[in-house]
Image: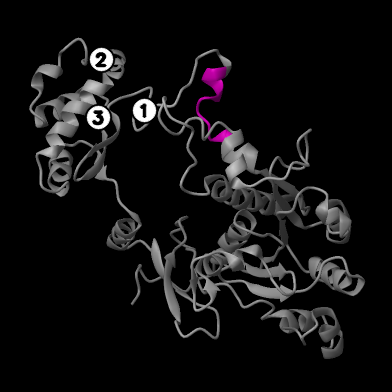
Amino acid sequence: MNYGREVPSVKRPFEGIRVLDFGTNVAGPNAAAMLSDFGADVIKIERPGTGDEARAFRPWVEGRSVMNMWLNRGKRSLSIPLGEEQSNAALKELIKTADVMIESFRPGVMKKFGLDYGSVSKINPRLVYCSISMFGHEGNLSKTPGYDLLAQAMTGMMDASGYPDGPPQRNGFSVCDYVASHNAFGGIAMALYNREKTGEGQHVDIGLFNVGFSMNPYIETTMLGYNSTRSGDHHKSIGPYGVFSCSKGSLAIISPTPKLWASLCTLIGHEEMIDDPDFAEAGPRLQNIERVVAVVEEWMEGFDDLSEPERLLMESGIPCSKVLNNAEAIEKAVEDDYNTVVDMETPSGMEMKTIRARGPHIKLSATPGKVTKGSPNLGEHSAEILKELGYGDEEIKKMTGAGGQ
């Protein structure tokens, strides 16, 4: 069964582009996978034995990480050690053939292997080299190791999440990792476009802290002296704009404009609040938001199921949605039928031949992206890739330790 519209068989934007993916975990691998979605030949460089750390991410299906299948979709796997003379020589030959190289080690690690941008740009000046780390490769904190959780903690993101009288809260998604991958994808695309004009590659430097900091809308107001505090389920600047809950579940409701406010008051049977000075304007309404929440949630409680108040709100022109769980979100995506959910091939050797997965979220009308298959088996394409470079079977066996597998 196809869970999205049929993707036409046309040339994709990055066909003919070779990407070497040295990334691990989420940010680097997903940036490379997005390039694969749009046609790039992505070669995943993995350590022998264990491979990318994402191969251990749970949950598993038939002993394989589902997350790894998605993060490394559409790639070929070359399992080869870094730092050894013969394997590094092979990697440098491979780099000569590449257009893009992605790595997500702490600054300084790739230099130890002679694979940093300064070194490899000498053998391939057209190479677009993308690094993803905590703070980027410049600045006083560049050597700081980092993960998504630390980026959330350092950028004000956690402090903005939760209730004023409670502790900061972690975002339920690895949001800095994913946004870093999207910024890396965009930075690589810009660098490739610039290369078309100049013939020269460049270093794309992405920091988890930097992308998290760039998403914080309270930076400027804080620097102007305005105190920013957590506001729980309701927006601190406009309202109603938040999550309303009752025993049946929760609804996200947005009605901060005079027209929407009047529509909401009329719908819930509190027309007197439309012109009440405590609620008529945005400022007083925010000061009295607890009363607004109370009357809306009391109205919601009168229904057996939240589908009915959701329908009534939408018919009144009030933007709203039930707060969906993951299964319900998938149903919504399938209903949308815009390749948000697709069938993705699993690695070879699995009994389950496809799984349902996230499709490309960037939509191009003439050259759309396409998810092809999940993560390759570790070292699955080692012999194939090294033979493309002219190595013989014995050399391949010495480098990989298992005849290319």
3 or 1: tag closer to the N-terminus: 1
Name the residue at the top extreme.
Answer: 277
The span shown in magenta is 213-222
- Residue that appears at 47% across and 60% down: 360
The disc placed on residue 300 is none
Task: Verify CB contact (< 8 Å) between mark 3 and mark 1.
Answer: no
| Residue at numbered disc 3 | 255
- Furthest toward the right, the residue is 85
Q: Which mark is residue 235?
A: 1
- Judged by depth in the image, the label closer to the viewer, 3 or 1, is 1
Sequence-wise first label, 3 or 2: 3
Amino acid at circle 3: Ser
The majority secondary structure of the magenta stretch comes to helix
Q: Position of residue 25 (x, y in %)?
A: 62, 58
Identify whether 148 is placed above or below 68: above
Between the C-alphas of marks 3 and 2, the distance is 12 Å
Magenta run includes residue 24: no
Q: Residues within 10 Å of mark 3 (few under 14, many from 20)?
A: many
The residue to which callout 2 is attached is 281
Front residue (pair 132, 199): 132
- Kind of residue at badge 1: His
Q: Please name the residue shown 67% across and 74% down the image.
A: 77
Left or right? Give the position of 299 relative to 160.
Answer: left
